[in-house]
Amino acid sequence: TVASIPSEDFNSVAELKMLISKAAGVRAGRQQLVLGDRVLSDASNISKFREGAELTLVVLPADTVLTASCDRTARLWSVASGQCTRVFRGTQGDMLSATFSPDGCTIVTAGSDGTVSFWSTSTGDCLETLWVHDSGVLSVTLSPDGATL
């Protein structure tokens, strides 16, 4: 959990992002909030949030986008040029989820083959792969300090 913020403390996604910014030190412009499988825009209707709803916070590096794909790769993309700058490949199955470590030095991917893999952001090398499930791993995230998967 990055922050626990009571729903009565905000009236919009934009206000929630500002509260997260204060609590977690992440600029609102680098935040992307996800509820279930839906990315929330700043204009999203928050009255539909049920009490205790858990949102996923995705922190975007200022100049890079990370994607996971059914072609068994994760990719880094330059926001400025729109070009792919690094490809992470080597898993047996599709990559279903990818996230940056808090320090940005490592990427963690979740695979349809039941694996979680750790990759060097700078070299693209796979540092370690863990077999964690008999079926696909749909999503992966790290704690704010990067110590817990």
Image: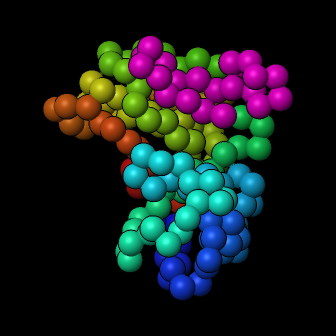
Instruction: Evaluate whether residue 71 shows in this view.
Output: yes
For the point 50% across and 53% down, which residue is it? 34
Determine which quarter of the picture holds residue 130. Answer: top left
Number of disc labels: 0
Instruction: Evaluate whether residue 23 shows in this view.
Output: no
Q: Where residue 42 sits: x, y (%)? A: 66, 59
Question: Would residue 2 appear left or right of 53 to someone viewing this image?
Answer: right
Q: Is residue 35 above or below residue 121?
A: below
Question: Would residue 102 appear left or right of 37 to someone viewing this image?
Answer: right
For the point 44% across and 35% down, which residue is it? 97
Is residue 33 or residue 104 the one in the foreground? Answer: 33
Question: Would residue 129 appear left or right of 142 to someone viewing this image?
Answer: left
For the point 72% across and 60% down, which residue is it? 28
* In the image, residue 146 lies in the stretch drawn in magenta: no
Part of the protein shown in magenta: 65-85
Q: Where residue 14 sits: x, y (%)? A: 69, 66
Determine which quarter of the picture holds residue 35. Answer: bottom left
* Colouring style: rainbow
Q: Where residue 128 sits: x, y (%)? A: 41, 30
Is residue 34 or residue 120 the one in the foreground? Answer: 34
Question: Would residue 78 appear left or right of 107 to someone viewing this image?
Answer: right
* In the image, residue 81 lies in the stretch drawn in magenta: yes
For the point 54% across and 36% down, which residue is it? 107
